[in-house]
Amino acid sequence: MKTIHPEVRIGHIHLKVSDLERAIEFYRDVLGFEVTQRYGNQAAFLSAGGYHHHIGLNTWDSAGGLPPPRGATGLYRVAIVYPTRAELAGALRQLFKAGIRLDGASDHGVSEALYLRDPDGNGVELYCDRPKDQWPRTADGELNMITEPLDVEDLLKEATETANSCG
């Protein structure tokens, strides 16, 4: 079986939301994405760094809707990669400032991750990868990801220090 080209990547996510303005406030004002385009009061596109869009939000089929019930199929979470541990720490500080509660925080060996929910109940992961040469491996060289508690207080200390890779 032919494997996919190594430069293929996930381009963006498009989320159904119940309240467009509330969703924009979360992704723009809390997480810091920029609105790049709006389609009236039904849809908006947001990005980081001037890209056309990383996140699409719409109410086409979901205005005033409820989150899917527990046990339903669908999106589990969207994961947003931060370039450095200091940037991830800054995002954590912003979440706390906005009163956003974390669902969890984990050290996976390959990355450090924060878990939360957006206003529509969509799972959101904010994370920072460790350098590949620091990823945990078995004696046979296989990837050996873990799930251990992340020291959130230690991460917060990074918010004021210089940018370091995760780890």
Image (tube, helix red, strand yellow):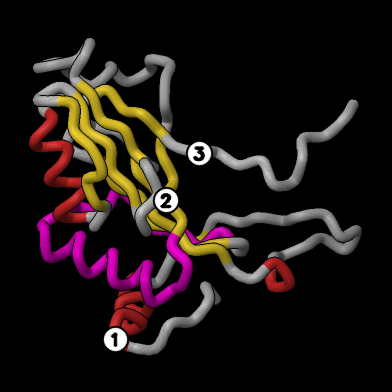
Q: Residues within 10 Å of mark 2 (few under 14, many from 20)?
A: some
- Which residues are the magenta region? 82-108
Kind of residue sitting beneath label 2:
Ile
Classify mark 1: helix, strand or loop.
helix
Disc on the earlier residue, 3 or 1: 3
Disc on the earlier residue, 1 or 2: 2
Q: Nearer the viewer, residue 69 or 87?
A: 87
Q: Which residue is mark 2?
A: 80
Q: CA distance from mark 3 to mark 1?
A: 31 Å
- Residue 19, given in percent of the width and then of the height, sits at 11, 27
Q: Quadrant of residue 132?
A: bottom right
Q: Nearer the viewer, residue 32 or 96?
A: 32
Q: Residues within 10 Å of mark 3 (few under 14, many from 20)?
A: few
Q: Is residue 130 above or below residue 45?
A: below
Classify mark 3: helix, strand or loop.
loop
Q: Residue at x 60, y 42 (%)?
A: 9
Q: CA distance from mark 2 to mark 3?
A: 12 Å
Kind of residue sitting beneath label 3:
Gly
Task: Answer whether residue 7 is magenta in the image.
Answer: no
Q: Nearer the viewer, residue 106 or 78?
A: 78
